Image: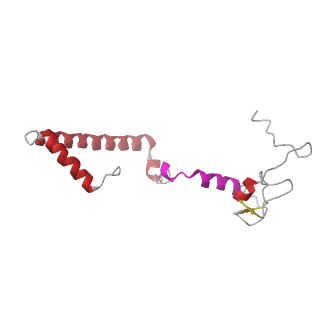
Amino acid sequence: MSFGLSFEKIILIGVIAALIIGPDKLPQFAASFAQLLNKGRDLLKGARVRMRDEIGPEFDEVDWRKLDPRQYDPRRIVREAFLDDAPGSSAPTANPFAPAGAAVASGTATAVAGKTIRDAAATRVAFSAENPPPFDSEST
């Protein structure tokens, strides 16, 4: 985590800090900065030990890279949610964006009723008395 700082920028910040602080107080500031870094490192180690104590042996089994929020891709999650069948079910699922009577082409993960997901999502469904919109009585 360099926060976008290159080596040249860090050197420039150090030179400016040395000019502002002055050569007589620079060793004191360097020592206090080193103490601050050591306290921060000890605080992080203490938090890790406390988490390991509270969670127990499962702490070592957790894949922390998988839980990294930078791995979150909402498009992938929505795509997988629409394309995943129910566990143990081999029957094709209905597409909520396709016209009435259309179904998912069996064996395909990227095609829905012969269209790609974007085409299926762009398809407008005309609702009428014969084809009412979906209604979930448990959610309202």
User: Dividing the image into 4 quarters, which one contains the C terminus?
Assistant: top right
Please check the rendered image and state whether residue 72 is part of the magenta-colored stretch, yes or no: yes
User: Where is residue 28 drawn, in percent x and y?
Assistant: 12, 39
Pick whichever, 115 or 110, lies toward us: 115
**Looking at the picture, how far across and down is residue 5, in whole percent?**
31, 52
Q: Nearer the viewer, residue 116 or 93?
A: 116
Outermost residue, left side = 24
User: Residue at horizontal 16%, vertical 40%?
Assistant: 20
Q: Is residue 128 left or right of residue 112?
A: right
Would you say the magenta stretch is mainly helix, strand or loop? helix
Q: How is the image coloured?
A: secondary structure
Q: Quadrant of residue 44?
A: top left
Residue 35 lies left or right of residue 128; in this view the side is left
Residue 100 vs 111, above or below: the answer is: above
Q: Residue furthest right?
A: 130
Residue 137 occupies quadrant: top right
Residue at the image point whose x is 92% and y is 45% from the top: 130
What residue is drawn where x is 82% and y is 49%? 125
Which is nearer the eye, 85 or 6?
Answer: 6
The outermost residue toward the top is 140
Residue 125 in the magenta stretch? The answer is no
x, y percentage for residue 127?
85, 45
35 on left or right of 49: left
In the displayed structure, 78 sits above or below 44; it is below
Q: Magenta region: which residues?
A: 68-84
**What x and y, as percent, mark residue 65?**
46, 54
